[in-house]
Amino acid sequence: MSSFRKALKSRQRNHHERSQPNFRNNLGLLEKKKDYKLRANDHHKKQNTLAALRKKALEKNPDEFYHKMISSKLEDGVHVMKKAEEESVMTEEQKKMMRTQDIKYVEMKRVAEAKKIERLKGELHLLDAESKQKNKHTFFVDSKKEVQTFNLVSHLDTVPELVDRVFNRPTLKILETKSIQGTVDSRSVKKLNRQRKHQYKILSQRIDREKKMFVISQKIQTRKDLQDKSKKLKVKKETRNAAAIYKFEAKRKR
């Protein structure tokens, strides 16, 4: 039965909606079903929006606060922002003063951070830093024969494994006296290594913070300079790690 319906359907002609009759051409195009669907959907959408707004107005809390209640006012039934009026209240000199205070505050914080960095560097001495330039230790002898027979291990009185170390290089006497407490020393050494790594991590974080504060102060200074009404040309765009660079017109100062 289903195959008969399919065969019967294939013989049918496609349904075509009639066009506007000639005597009704003055009324425009005849509305088809697809046009009616678009118009009906738009009408229902507007009705749903009005119903939702009506419900929101009925359920509104009268004690609710919005920040735009302060920054806007009602004029002839229309909300107008007060931003333009607030900008006119503050003069250019006052704006420059605020920028100067911001720069002073950021610079104060940056200097304090730089002092902390110097103190940490003094405590750590960057002992095991990979990028640190290696120091030279020169030994003086009396003759060329002693230069040829010079033994660094015996001169430093330590074991060959510790010759390349620049810190914590004990002598043989210290190693012999402390050999009994080997287990305790290994634990203390591990603890000291963890503490030193933690201190280096704090140092790197403070260095990054100091660099960011320097960039912030540069950006504030650039915005302060842009308030001067002089011709300027942008040389370099502002990035996350650097302030924008402008070229100003040279002025003769009296």
Image (cartoon, rainbow, N blue to C red):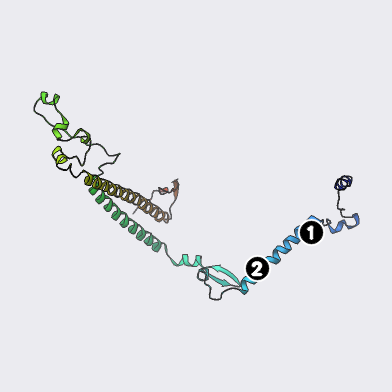
Please name the residue shown 17% across and 43% down the image.
180
Task: Look at the numbered disc 2 and give the secondary structure of its residue.
Answer: helix
Relative to 51, is 116 above or below? above
Residue 52, x across and y down, in percent: 65, 68
Task: Look at the numbered disc 1 and give the secondary structure of its residue.
Answer: helix
Q: Which residue is mark 1?
A: 36
Relative to 53, is 226 above or below? above
Instruction: Give left or right: position of 150 versus 85.
Output: left
Per the model, the C-alpha gap separating discs 1 and 2 is 24 Å
Crowding near the residue tagged with mark 1, few <14, some 14–19, many ≥20 C-alpha atoms within 10 Å = few
Q: Hey, what amino acid is under mark 1?
A: Tyr
Closer to the chain start, of discs 1 and 2, is: 1
Q: Where, quadrant-wise, is the C terminus in this rendering?
A: bottom left
Q: Which residue is mark 2?
A: 52
Please name the residue shown 53% across and 75% down the image.
63
Relative to 131, is 72 above or below? below
Using the image, tell me which numbered label, if any, was put on residue 19: none
Instruction: Give left or right: position of 134 versus 213.
Output: left
